[in-house]
Image: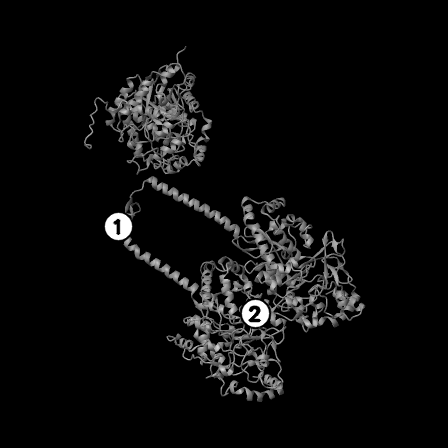
């Protein structure tokens, strides 16, 4: 009588405990890991707001993301929240372009291709910005963004009390979400950011990226875990359009890849997606789209007759390297020949390319096309007007300046002001507003040299003006 | 000097006592655990006879094992106890003193239930536990009542066979008879509960059974409350029987053939007015622990006695109603009322010591005699002292009640160390005198030889 | 296993508990009852606490006008007691006793700041009362800035017009007083409690405890935060005083909602003071570009945004109460001109108005008929569209204080809800407004730089350079308030200086070329709008 019920009771207890554990596990999965795909009807919307797989690995919880500028405002470049970082933010949208919100258990904010590949320009200072999808961002400061997150995470103000106060003043989360945020998500986010911060320490010993530029070193050092070779890879963002016409050409400014698909996936990894979280179909949808998009037209009037005289000059001096079908277009020109700043091509050794090709051997999207070159790729110049500043490192503000010899190119100018200078072909890079809004660019800093690419510098002023006018039509 | 009324004989129907001083019921735990008597009890009772009391009312003598208050009290539950009681009677009689056995049943008031009883609830008129210690109980069935009535009858028979001078039924202080009589306790719906005559029925049946068993010429007195004051401690309790109701009960007792009444008060024991006097928390802290597990409120009470911070709460409750009554002659006024309504002699107990007071009450007809316990413990020869013309002994009883609290655990005696000039050893020596003479006097005792030992 | 025979070993010692006595069982019952009792008491106490601190009950008014004037839109502090959010004013009893605590800072009480006290009420128009977080709290509502007073002469009775710009209310000095006094050394729990007692408020021991340990310290804390965030606006010599009847709508918002460091903004962006607009007859305005610079076409967003300015947060806002206000002002008719109008003169003015003004401002039909008819009367006009700054040429500070960066930040307000802002737009000028009840909307232009209608018809160089604002006696000849009175019964009025940045009275030259007679006629007609 004493042992009878004892024997029968145990299985029931075990079953109940297991059931509770299963429920708990399901709840934890639902609240922390469940993925809800971001689906958009049009390719443009997909490009602007869809996830490419960053959120699950390095996404920031939405409510923390929203609170941080209000908690650490002085760590941003200026008043304006995330807008002060030069994000492209369309009227009426809850998030800037390139900041997808994806639910992985809870809403998380990541970045995608559009973060760096969306340009803005204004024809006049009082205009509202026009956003050009696929064009290299001239305003967004990616390094400043991650540094802001790290600095705020290091700050004592980054604590559950402060963040919950911010959250509770703008929304009414459920009890369970509040509890999760307070006791799990906020502390975990702080820890994760501080850990990530260590993987970005190498940045502190190098010149700043500045707005509109990035570096491949995060990939070398964070993803491939290669040793720190103290190189500087600061480079302007590439345009993403008309990729079909670029078939077979080397990609990236130093030609480290040949496949658009591989370039896309690797960029997603560099943006923070992990091997497991990267959303390859989402990346490939972007790639498919940019294969057939066209560059934006020059939005100001063009002097057609002047441009017509510039055409032959372009053919004579530029087309061989920069026209679709040019003999050397899409090939790497040795750094000794082009003469531009060597830092970028030096920062990507064959070892990095090999490591890259080995990185995803077990994945269907295994990389094969990575290479290393000793120079810079001669790129086709479609839509070149909005790709300012020029050269791979953005060291020359306008097309007109590029046609001048190095000593006549500006030594110091300001990047990040998006009012366009339709005469010189580039963004306004000096003057009080450019200085207030922009970031100082000093060509004397390592990796910032504006030397080299002397083709066309010997033309007459009239020829140069005609050539610039012609290039606006590209 | 006119004749001292205290020392005039008191004549009952079938008993004459030489003076008006009765030793009221009191005892220590002198006897064997099974209720058989010891020499100590003989020593104890003889000491008061020697001191000049007219009669001794024995301590609480249970008529059945279930009716004990504490173990180690001699019982009268079997014929095998008769010889012992005969010996007690003879010892007392040697001093021209009468011996009246108090036949008792504690009902639910079992202060220390004893190992034989602790798994069963006490018998009572009700299922509700006692309000002081939380002593648990259950209502007796008719069969149990009949059986208990018979136990009393047999007890009376044994007392008579032992050559004792009479019996007293303890129908006060919250013991079984009170549990039936008191409207505050008795919640029965049958013929033993409800109206007064129903509540009286159990006592009535016992008196009748005793009379049937021992005849009409054996002295039978009833110790009866004059008032219940059941709510003296806890104001939320019921008040209990009034004086009028008890007068009625006393009249019925007389009609049923009681030879005398012995008036006291209080529906529980202890009770703020019974015994009147002090309430020594230091002693309670030491000795109440012995009965902490007896009732469901024991630990609770013990906490109140133990923790000085909360003592005042209990003392406030305890002293609340008490102030309306005198310490000496606490129930004397009520006794006078009862005496007016009955023709049999009436004794009174509760705080008597002062000779002048006793004399006045008796001579003014408030009562016919007094029963004294604590002052006699302090001064067993109090009657001789009063007879010598003094109204108070040199070291009178202080009514501190330390004797009663000690009785739970220790030999009964006067534990007021102030009466010994603060000499604890002297006090203990005095307390221990009750064991003299020892059960086996020295010259007859077997020699105890120290055996073994290291050589 | 039976209950009475548990056997367990502990450190090798066998411990047996094999039996229980009835007393043990009873004691167990008592303990259980005691525990239950204790638990019940704790739960009861907790329940009383929770009931008190989670109670959220505004004062309610059956009458819509009363609701508008005194009802709560949720701008009192709310959220939870441990995490109070929102609200810019201290709790009720602190609020009403503040003028006693710092008497020299506000000798005339709140009334001297232009707050309107109607027949013996404890709180002025525009201050709502609501029981929240366990105490009576106060907040601002729409009526504080949108209820004006008018007198015919200094001796006449004040007329109160709900929906009219509170041209008499000195909001900036009101905030300054509250911030100053709650940081004053006299603002101690003891003093506050003593003043509450004197004012007839009763506090029990618990409430005194909370005042000491929660309310007074928290008031100080939020004051410190607010005054730090607002000091670049409130204590900056380069930012001119708002003066009565004006507020800087968006700069405090940048600081309070987004914690922007205002000091890092271009100084001229911090100058954004402009007049309170009228809040009547909103129905026909749906779809027009609202706010002075026309930055939003949605009435709902305009209302929610203004509520944020009054101190609500997305979690403390009272949507039903706000909606009731919104519905009421939707149909609230503009007030009739309360003085005589020279009809013949007005008729002459009507023709001039049609020629000079209707294209941008609509005409007299706007205030007549139904919402739909009023809307129809604007057909073919440019009412509710933005006039580029180059054309209107009025002071541009207000326009520049609203930036694109600010607009995109506004899109994150009321996040994850149906209320999230998405209609705010940066514009390039000032919006053309309908002129219903224009007689009561003085002073004129967005920054209130021109005191009367008649002055507005003069070229800028002939408009008054300085004038007093805040006085509510009406100037029937010029169409506006009397501007020459500097003080009355202890209340000092504000000397408005048009030479200060943001206060420019240039621009809007339409009508300035008319003759004096024509101008008088035009003003006479405009009184009927």
Labels 2, 1: front one: 2
C204 in relation to A136, above or below: above
User: Looking at the image, which residue sits at the far top?
Assistant: B1
Q: Which mark is residue B162?
A: none
Based on the displayed image, in which of its 4 quarters is residue C75 positioned? Answer: bottom right
Name the quadrant of the N terminus of chain B: top left
Q: Percent from the top left, x then y, of residue B209? A: 30, 27
- Number of dots carrying numbers: 2
Q: Is residue C415 left or right of residue C160?
A: left
C277 in relation to C183, above or below: below
What kind of element bears circle 2? Answer: loop
Which one is in front, B299 or C263?
C263
Q: According to the image, what is the colour scheme of the structure?
A: one colour
Q: Percent from the top left, x then y, of residue B97? A: 31, 18
Q: Residue at x 77, y 63 (%)?
A: C478
Q: Which residue is mark 2?
A: A92
Can residue C312 be seen by looking at this rendering?
Answer: yes
Q: Residue at x 25, y 22 (%)?
A: B87
Q: From mark 2 to mark 1, how far is it between C-alphas?
A: 74 Å
Q: Percent from the top left, x then y, of residue B264? A: 39, 25
Name the quadrant of the C terminus of chain B: top left
Q: Which residue is mark 1?
A: A1
Which one is in front, C362 or A337?
A337
Q: Residues within 10 Å of mark 1 (few under 14, many from 20)?
A: few
Based on the displayed image, in which of its 4 quarters is residue C445 positioned? Answer: bottom right
Q: Write down the chain letter for disc 2.
A: A
Q: Percent from the top left, x then y, of residue A377? A: 49, 82
Q: Write down the chain letter for disc 1.
A: A
């Amino acid at each position: 009588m004493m042992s009878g019920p004892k024997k029968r009771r145990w299985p029931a207890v075990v079953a109940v405990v297991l059931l509770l554990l299963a429920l708990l596990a399901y709840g934890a999965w639902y609240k922390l890991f469940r993925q809800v795909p971001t689906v958009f009807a049009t390719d443009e919307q997909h490009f602007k707001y869809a996830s490419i797989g960053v959120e699950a690995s390095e996404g920031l919880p939405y409510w923390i993301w929203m609170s941080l500028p209000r908690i650490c405002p002085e760590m941003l470049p200026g008043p304006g929240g995330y807008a002060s970082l030069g994000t492209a933010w369309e009227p009426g949208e809850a998030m800037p372009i390139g900041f997808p919100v994806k639910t992985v258990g809870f809403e998380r904010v990541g970045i995608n291709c559009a973060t760096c590949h969306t340009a803005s320009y204004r024809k006049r200072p009082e205009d509202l910005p026009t956003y050009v999808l696929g064009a290299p961002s001239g305003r967004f400061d990616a390094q400043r963004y991650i540094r802001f997150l790290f600095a705020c995470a290091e700050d004592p103000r980054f604590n559950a009390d402060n963040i919950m106060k911010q959250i509770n003043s703008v929304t009414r989360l459920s009890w369970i979400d509040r509890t999760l945020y307070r006791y799990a998500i906020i502390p975990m986010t702080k820890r994760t950011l501080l850990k990530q911060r260590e993987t970005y320490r190498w940045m502190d010993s190098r010149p700043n990226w500045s707005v509109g530029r990035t570096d491949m070193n995060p990939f070398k050092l964070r993803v491939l875990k290669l040793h720190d070779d103290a190189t500087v890879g600061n480079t302007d963002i590439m345009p993403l359009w008309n990729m079909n016409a670029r078939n077979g050409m080397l990609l990236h400014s130093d030609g480290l890849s040949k496949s658009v698909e591989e370039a896309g996936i690797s960029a997603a990894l560099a943006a923070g997606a992990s091997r497991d979280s990267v959303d390859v179909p989402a990346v490939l949808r972007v790639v498919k789209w940019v294969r057939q998009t066209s560059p934006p037209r020059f939005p100001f009037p063009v002097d057609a007759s002047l441009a017509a005289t510039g055409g032959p000059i372009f053919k004579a001096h530029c087309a061989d390297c920069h026209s679709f079908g040019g003999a050397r277009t899409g090939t790497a020109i040795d750094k000794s020949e082009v003469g531009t700043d060597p830092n970028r091509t030096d920062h990507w050794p064959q070892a990095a390319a090999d490591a890259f090709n080995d990185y995803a051997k077990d994945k269907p999207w295994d990389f094969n096309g990575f290479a290393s070159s000793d120079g810079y790729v001669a790129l086709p110049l479609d839509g070149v007007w909005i790709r300012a500043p020029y050269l791979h490192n953005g060291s020359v503000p306008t097309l007109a300046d590029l046609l001048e010899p190095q000593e006549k190119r500006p030594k110091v100018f300001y990047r990040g002001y998006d009012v366009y200078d339709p005469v010189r072909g580039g963004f306004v890079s000096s003057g009080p507003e450019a200085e207030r809004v922009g970031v100082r660019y000093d060509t004397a800093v390592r990796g910032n040299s504006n030397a080299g690419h002397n083709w066309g510098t010997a033309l007459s002023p009239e020829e140069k003006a005609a050539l610039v006018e012609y290039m606006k039509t590209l | 000097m006119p004749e001292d009324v205290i020392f005039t004989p008191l004549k009952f129907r079938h008993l004459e006592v030489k003076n008006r001083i009765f030793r009221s019921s009191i005892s220590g735990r002198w006897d064997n655990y099974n209720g058989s008597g010891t020499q100590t009890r003989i020593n104890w009772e003889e000491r008061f006879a020697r001191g000049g009391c007219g009669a001794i009312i024995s301590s609480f003598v249970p008529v059945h094992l279930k009716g004990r208050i504490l173990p180690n009290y001699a019982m009268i539950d079997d014929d095998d106890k008769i010889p012992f009681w005969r010996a007690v009677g003879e010892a007392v009689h040697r001093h021209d003193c009468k011996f009246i056995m108090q036949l008792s049943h504690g009902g639910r008031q079992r202060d220390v239930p004893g190992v034989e009883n602790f798994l069963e609830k006490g018998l009572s008129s009700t299922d509700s536990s006692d309000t002081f210690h939380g002593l648990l109980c259950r209502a007796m069935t008719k069969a149990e009542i009949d059986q208990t009535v018979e136990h009393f009858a047999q007890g009376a028979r044994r007392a008579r066979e032992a050559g004792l001078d009479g019996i007293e039924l303890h129908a006060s202080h919250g013991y079984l008879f009170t549990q039936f009589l008191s409207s505050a306790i008795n919640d029965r719906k049958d013929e033993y509960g409800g109206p007064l005559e129903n509540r009286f029925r159990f006592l009535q049946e016992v008196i009748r059974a005793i009379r049937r068993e021992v005849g009409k010429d054996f002295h039978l007195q009833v110790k009866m409350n004059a008032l219940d004051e059941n709510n003296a401690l806890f104001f939320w309790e019921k008040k209990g029987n009034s004086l009028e109701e008890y007068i009625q009960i006393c009249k019925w007792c007389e009609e049923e053939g009681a030879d005398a009444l012995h008036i006291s008060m209080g529906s529980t024991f202890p009770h703020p007015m019974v015994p009147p006097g002090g309430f020594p928390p230091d002693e309670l802290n030491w000795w109440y622990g012995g009965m902490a597990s007896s009732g469901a409120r024991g630990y609770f009470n013990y906490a109140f006695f133990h923790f000085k911070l909360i003592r005042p709460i209990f003392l406030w409750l305890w002293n609340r109603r008490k102030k309306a009554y005198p310490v000496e002659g606490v129930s004397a006024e009520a006794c006078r009322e009862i005496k007016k309504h009955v023709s049999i002699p009436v004794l009174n107990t509760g705080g008597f010591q002062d000779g002048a007071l006793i004399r006045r009450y008796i001579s003014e007809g408030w009562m016919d005699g007094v029963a004294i316990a604590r002052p006699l413990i302090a001064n067993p020869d109090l009657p001789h002292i009063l007879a010598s013309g003094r109204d108070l002994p040199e070291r009178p009883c202080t009514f501190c009640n330390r004797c009663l609290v000690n009785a739970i655990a220790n030999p009964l005696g006067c534990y007021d160390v102030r009466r010994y000039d603060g000499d604890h050893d002297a006090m203990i020596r005095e307390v221990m005198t009750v064991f003299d003479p020892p059960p086996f006097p020295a010259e007859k005792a077997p020699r105890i030889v120290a055996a073994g030992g290291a050589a | 296993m039976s209950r009475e025979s548990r056997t367990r070993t502990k450190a090798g010692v066998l411990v047996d508990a094999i039996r229980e006595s009835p007393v043990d069982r009873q004691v167990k019952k008592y303990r259980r009852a005691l525990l239950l009792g204790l638990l019940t008491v704790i739960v009861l106490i907790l329940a009383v606490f929770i009931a008190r601190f989670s109670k959220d009950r505004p004062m309610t008014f059956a009458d819509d006008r009363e609701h508008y004037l005194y009802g709560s839109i949720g701008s009192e502090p709310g959220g939870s007691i441990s995490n109070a959010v929102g609200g810019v004013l201290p709790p009720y009893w602190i609020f009403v006793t503040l003028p006693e605590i710092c008497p020299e800072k506000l000798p005339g009480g709140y009334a001297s700041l232009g707050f309107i006290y109607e027949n013996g009420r404890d709180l002025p128009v525009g201050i709502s009362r609501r029981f929240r977080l366990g105490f009576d709290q106060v907040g601002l509502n729409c009526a504080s800035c949108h209820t004006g007073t008018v007198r015919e002469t200094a001796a006449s009775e004040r007329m109160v017009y709900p929906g009219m710009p509170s041209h008499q209310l000195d909001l900036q000095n009101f905030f300054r007083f509250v911030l100053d006094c709650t940081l004053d050394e006299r603002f101690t729990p003891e003093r506050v409690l003593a003043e509450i007692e004197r004012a007839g408020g009763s506090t029990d021991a618990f409430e005194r405890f909370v005042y000491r340990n929660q309310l007074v310290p928290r008031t100080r804390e939020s004051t410190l935060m607010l005054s730090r965030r607002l000091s670049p606006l409130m204590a900056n010599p380069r930012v001119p005083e708002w003066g009565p009847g004006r507020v800087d709508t968006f700069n405090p918002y940048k600081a309070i909602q987004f914690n922007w460091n205002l000091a890092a903004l271009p100084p001229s962006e911090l100058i954004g003071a402009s007049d309170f607009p009228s809040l009547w007859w909103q129905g026909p305005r749906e779809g027009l570009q609202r706010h002075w610079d026309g930055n939003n076409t949605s009435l709902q967003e305009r209302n929610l945004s203004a509520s944020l300015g009054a101190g609500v947060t997305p979690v403390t806002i009272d949507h039903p109460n706000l909606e009731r206000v919104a519905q009421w002002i939707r149909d609230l008719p503009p007030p009739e001109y309360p003085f005589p109008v020279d009809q013949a003169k007005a008729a002459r003015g009507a023709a001039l108005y049609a020629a000079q003004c209707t294209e941008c401002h609509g005409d007299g039909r706007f205030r007549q008929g139904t919402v739909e008819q009023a809307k129809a009367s604007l057909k073919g006009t440019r009412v509710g569209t933005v006039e580029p700054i180059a054309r209107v040429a009025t002071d541009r500070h207000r326009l520049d204080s609203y930036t694109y960066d600010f607009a995109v930040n506004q899109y994150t307000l009321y996040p994850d809800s149906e209320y999230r802002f998405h209609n705010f737009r940066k514009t390039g000028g000032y919006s053309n407004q309908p002129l219903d009840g224009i007689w009561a909307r003085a002073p004129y232009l967005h920054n209130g730089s021109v005191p009367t209608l008649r002055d507005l018809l003069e070229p800028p160089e002939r408009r008054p350079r300085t004038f007093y604002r805040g006085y509510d006696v009406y100037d029937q000849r010029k169409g506006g308030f009397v501007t020459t009175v500097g003080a009355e019964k202890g209340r000092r009025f504000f000397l408005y200086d048009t030479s200060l940045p943001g206060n420019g009275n240039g621009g809007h030259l339409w009508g300035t070329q008319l003759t004096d007679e024509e101008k008088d006629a035009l003003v006479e007609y405009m009184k009927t709008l």
